Image (cartoon, helix red, strand yellow):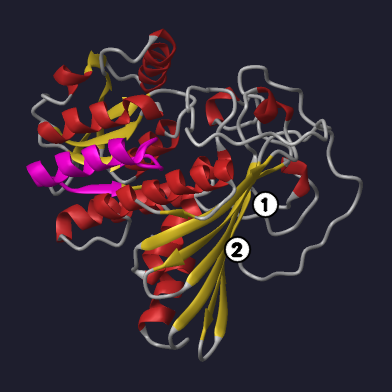
């Protein structure tokens, strides 16, 4: 890999996290070479690839041609769930290092296939997570230094403030053990938000999970309910060393929280209990009656993507708003790891195990019982 400006192939389109990753790689000094579209993506996703290429002034190439460009060293992959194993395998077999959107895949089988392809070729791979943030690194250091003693339990939250809440019918939605990811309007939040605390807790404990008890619910968003996906999830995860993690994940309306998201971990040890938060402790001053709700965007009603915003998102009159660019930090850590051989992020085998935890959580929520992690 060129030590100065590695070349990056983008496999993904607008209305995906590739919008953020492309910017992060460019900010890190990488060269964006092309957007690569794999065959069989479908008309909608291929169109989104084309729109991203046009917005960045990049060529849109068939993926097999893009990964064969002589300057290509990294593939940034953020395609729809059902295509991730195929796309990641093609990129790995071309000898490219992989930076992958979270979660690694939509099923344990696909995640295992990606991990096997990476190991077979010997390329580097990292999955986006919160592990490279300063507060997560501080939590890991506290554990490694023995400040807490033996870890007894961990609680972790990941709640994203996006979308406009609406009144929902009182009849609860029934979870299904097989998750369907063929939705562009609403995301499955046990997967989309839950993967953050699942990967963080497993990374901090450095242990494999053995069983999961989980529930899902619909409290806030008509878009989620109409697409038969959950907007909230909670789980208990038991680990090999006897520690138990409690996790909450999902979305709350963007007017409900003063920041874009709440991400936090509370670690309970024999010696001490410590809290690590994505935002520093502060005094919050509010005034007035807030801001009016933005007009509903039919293409992106949950306000998930930067490219669908017609203007800056209105903010309430709150002091001290800080927007941490965690994507840029994680991408920079990935590039540093390729140069040094020392990773600080989530590797491919760990990410595959995290997918197995999520799959067990869906089965637990559907069957209303504890489920072993495969």
**Hey, which quadrant is residue 310 in on the image?**
top right
Identify the element where label 1 is drawn: loop
> Which residue range is magenta in the image?
100-126
Q: State the residue position of label 1.
A: 259
Q: Position of residue 90 (x, y in %)?
A: 17, 28
Circle nearer the N terminus (2, 1)? 1
Looking at the picture, how far across and down is residue 279, in whole percent?
60, 63
Residue 286, given in percent of the width and then of the height, sits at 84, 57
Residue at 53% over, 53% down: 324
The answer to which of 217 and 85 lies nearer the viewer is 217
In front of the other: 3 or 330: 330
Tell whether label 1 touches label 2 (CB within 8 Å): yes
Instruction: Say if the magenta span includes residue 111.
Output: yes
- Residue 105 lies, with reference to residue 285, above or below; the image says above
* Residues packed near mark 2 inside 10 Å, few (<14), some (14 to 19) or many (20 plus): some
- Towards the viewer: 120 or 18: 120
Location of residue 365 with respect to 207 vertically, above or below: above
Instruction: Examine the rendered structure and indicate whether residue 38 appears above or below residue 324.
Output: above
- Looking at the image, the residue that sits furthest to the bottom is 271
Q: Residue at x 34, y 15 (%)?
A: 41
337 with respect to 266 (left or right): left
Q: Residue at x 58, y 23 (%)?
A: 185
The residue indicated by pointer 2 is 279
Q: Residue furthest top?
A: 43
Give the image quarter of residue 21. top left
């Amino acid at each position: 890999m060129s030590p100065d400006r590695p070349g990056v192939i983008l496999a993904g389109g607008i209305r995906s996290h590739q919008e953020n990753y492309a910017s992060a790689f460019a900010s890190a000094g990488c060269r964006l070479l092309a957007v690569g579209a794999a065959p069989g993506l479908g008309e909608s996703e291929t169109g989104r690839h084309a729109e991203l290429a046009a917005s960045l002034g990049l060529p849109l190439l068939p993926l097999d041609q893009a990964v064969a460009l002589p300057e290509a060293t990294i593939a940034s992959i953020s395609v729809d769930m059902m295509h991730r194993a195929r796309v990641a395998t093609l990129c790995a077999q071309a000898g490219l290092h992989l930076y992958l959107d979270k979660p690694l895949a939509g099923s344990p089988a696909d995640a295992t296939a990606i991990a096997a392809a990476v190991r077979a070729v010997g390329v580097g791979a990292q999955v986006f997570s919160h592990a490279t943030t300063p507060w997560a690194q501080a939590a890991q250091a506290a554990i490694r230094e023995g400040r807490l003693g033996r870890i007894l339990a961990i609680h972790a939250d990941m709640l994203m403030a996006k979308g406009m809440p609406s009144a929902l019918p009182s009849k609860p939605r029934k979870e299904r053990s097989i998750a369907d990811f063929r939705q562009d309007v609403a995301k499955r939040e046990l997967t989309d938000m839950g993967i953050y605390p699942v990967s963080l807790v497993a990374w901090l404990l450095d242990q494999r999970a053995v069983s999961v008890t989980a529930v899902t619910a619909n409290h806030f968003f008509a878009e989620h309910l109409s697409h038969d996906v959950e907007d909230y999830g909670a789980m208990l995860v038991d680990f090999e060393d006897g520690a138990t993690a409690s996790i909450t994940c999902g979305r709350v309306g963007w007017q409900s929280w003063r920041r874009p998201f709440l991400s936090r971990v509370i670690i309970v040890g024999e010696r001490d209990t410590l809290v690590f938060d994505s935002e520093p402790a502060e005094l919050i001053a509010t005034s007035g009656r807030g801001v009016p709700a933005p007009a509903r965007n039919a293409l992106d009603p949950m306000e998930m993507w930067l490219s669908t915003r017609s203007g800056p998102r209105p903010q309430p009159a709150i002091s001290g708003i800080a927007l941490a660019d965690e994507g840029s930090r994680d991408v920079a850590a990935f590039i540093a790891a390729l140069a040094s051989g020392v990773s600080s992020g989530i590797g491919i085998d760990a990410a595959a195990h995290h997918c197995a935890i999520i799959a067990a959580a869906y089965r637990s929520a559907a069957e209303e019982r504890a489920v072993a992690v495969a």
